[in-house]
Image: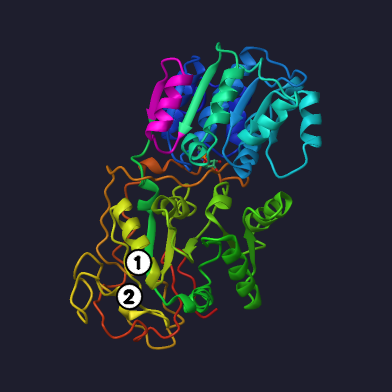
Amino acid sequence: MTDFKGLGLIEPLSRAVASEGYTTPTPIQLQSIPPLLKGRDLLGVAQTGTGKTAAFVLPMLQRLHELNAKPVRKSPRALILAPTRELAVQIDESVRAYGRHMGDNGNGVKSLAIFGGVPLGAQSKALGDGVLVLTATPGRLMDLLNQDKVRLDKVDVFVLDEADRMLDMGFINDVRKVATLIPKHRQTVLFSATMPQGVAVLANSMMDSPVRVEVAPQATTAERVVQSVLHVPKAKKRSLLTHVMKDPSISRVVVFTRTKHGADRVTQHLVQNGVNASAIHGDKAQNHRQRSLKEFRDGKVRVLVATDIAARGIDVDGITHVINFDLPNDAENYVHRIGRTARAGEDGFAISFCDAEERDYLDAIEKITRQTIPVMADHPFHAEAMTIPRTSPPNRGGGGGNRPPRVRMQGTPAGGNPKKKGHRPTDGKRHSDKGHGGHGHGEPQGHGSKKTNGKATGKSGAKSSPQSSARPRTEPSRSGGNAGGGQRPLRSNRRGGNASA
Ligand code: AMP
């Protein structure tokens, strides 16, 4: 197997990579690093979690080294555009980590992340002092460009990360404008989790005969995640959440809500019930968001409650579960959400609460992922009526129509068996379709927390069905979801914790 040196990386970079604990390049790194080192433009289709940040940062640093590029007042030599502030911060952390043995006297590369939501002063001063690598969100970059605090006339390497998100978020004009301010003679790299027409057109207008690399059919992320849906009346969702949170194997969880207000209410409810939780969303100040993320990463906070936009920059290892307190009204966001877990080759679980009004969202999600999400009926708030296929005659058991059969967990007596190992959620028919055109895009991430040594990432290779033979049996049930299940919380096989806690 090729190692990093075999890819042609110089010693300070391969040393930095080794101290990150990476032994083997991921598929996207194997494909991207050699052409980038040759100076080619590159168009990469890769999701977060594949190691794509290192795939562009390592050759970028090597190129700057070869050019003997030095920080110049106001004029960075490499520019990375990212859609969100969290992602910008995390990319910048990667630049620092991978560039730690480079720069003057090997003291590290001078880099900076700029993003909105904080005063301009410190950022413009740092730019004035000179940085080699600048990572920016488009809006803040435009502000600083307009004030002549930064210039792009010396940029040698231009990277657009999460281009599809950038377009979704309405940054297309800013991105185009920025591209015109960078010298034509440059290396351009574009990464995107999906390749909609808009991104293809943008790439075409900015790049010179790019090499195209692609890993993992889209939606692979979703395949690694063990998913379940819990039907519940809207008014019972919060009670269900506290019930679910009794499971100690849910040790690090992101709970998604549709609205900021909802995120605050859920957080408050959890805290009132003794669960350590923190909310991040667009109304929270940047320093609050960073602090919440840090506490979550450090394990001080068990639950991070987030809206879709705020969650984009979450790169935290070891997220055991994602809970969709509200189903997203945009089915693609479902895939982004559940991609927060099952990262770096780990297992992960996604639990979705679905009330009567959200049935259409569930249908849309199942359509886009081409999966039937197994119904987990074994909880005290199960809403029987909602699991009945809309197309089937009333009062018929599960399994009809295109809905999954309703199921309950293999019987433990009411109250649960404290010694029993945890279960994965129940299994309806779970079809996966690697070749489909879904949107397997986790969310932007970076390197805020470091990997354990040698951990392989690259979900692309992950072909396994996360469902194992240890799964509970599927059992059509018309008898109310709580039958036999009592208060036994949802559990995961993987961590197999002890229900007695
Ligand atoms: P990314 O897709 O760039 O957000 O990377 C996902 C995670 O994989 C990051 O936390 C990286 O630290 C980690 N990573 C990147 N490359 C490797 C590698 N070759 N081996 C192990 N972990 C890696």
Compare residues 136 and 292 and report the one nearer the observer: 136
State the CA–CA distance, disc 1 to disc 2: 8 Å
Q: Which residue is mark 2?
A: 386
The residue drawn where x is 44% and y is 81% is 488
What amino acid type is highlighted by mark number 2?
Met
Residue 413 sits in quarter: bottom left
Q: Which residue is mark 1?
A: 359
The residue drawn where x is 57% and y is 36% is 82
Residue 9 sits in quarter: top right
Task: Kindly give the residue lying farthest to the bottom in the view shown.
Answer: 414
Label 2 sits on a secondary structure element that is helix
Residue 376 sits in quarter: bottom left
The yes-or-no answer for disc 1 within 8 Å of ligand 1 is no
Q: Is residue 112 above or below residue 353?
A: above
Dot 1 or dot 2, earlier in sequence:
1
Q: Is residue 57 magenta?
A: no
Magenta residue span:
192-213
What amino acid type is highlighted by mark number 1?
Arg
Is disc 1 in contact with disc 2, using a CB cutoff of under 8 Å? Answer: yes
Q: Is residue 68 left or right of residue 255?
A: right
Sort mark 1 into few (<14), some (14-19) or many (20+) by Cα contacts within 10 Å: some
Image position, residue 373 (x, y; %): 32, 62
Image position, residue 55 (x, y; %): 50, 30
